[in-house]
Amino acid sequence: NVAAPSINVCKISLFPRVERLAYTFNSRGFFTTNFLKKQAMVFTNGEIDVIEDFANYHFVIQFTNMLGVPPNIENFREMVNVNKPAHLTYEIKYRYRTWGEVKDFTWAEIAQYTWDEARSKEGILNGTYY
């Protein structure tokens, strides 16, 4: 006999448990591009494109309306893992600023930010979003 792993549910806060139940009930067994887009909005407040590679049983989730890693990405990943068909693989791509997008700013303007902020924080560089 193999003992089942014990999970101390008291250590898991209520919000993640409620969220997990919500995405499990909302899936209703259908994993479509439209479902994925709606769930991305619910979990991360982000818009996505889904690129399907049927020949390789793979899809790419590309965030399109935000910079950097979205909030709540781990719960979104968990939702994808729970709901996607088992034979499919996937990857998630994020959007960052490129050097070309900041070329109009001086080093003095950019120097007030860390590299991570300059490439992925929204609302900086004079409020410019690329």
Image: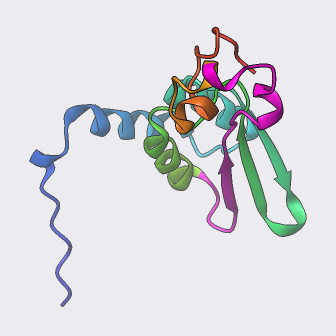
In the drawing, does residue 25 fall left or right of residue 100?
A: left
Figure quadrant of residue 5: bottom left
Q: Quadrant of the N terminus?
A: bottom left
Identified at 53% across, 29% down, the residue is 44
Q: Position of residue 128 (x, y in %)?
A: 69, 13
Identified at 58% across, 14% down, the residue is 123
Q: Position of residue 64 (x, y in %)?
A: 73, 30
Q: How many numbered marks does the figure carry? A: 0
30 up-or-down from 103: above or below: below
Q: Position of residue 121 (x, y in %)?
A: 56, 26
Identified at 20% across, 75% down, the residue is 4
| Magenta segment includes 100 | yes
76 up-or-down from 54: above or below: above
Figure quadrant of residue 17: top left
7 up-or-down from 19: above or below: below
48 up-or-down from 60: above or below: above
In the drawing, does residue 28 fall left or right of residue 53?
A: left
The single residue placed furthest to the front in the displayed view is: 108
Task: State which region is magenta.
Answer: 84-108
The single residue placed furthest to the top in the displayed view is: 126
Most foreground residue, 28 or 77? 77
Identified at 71% across, 21% down, the residue is 106
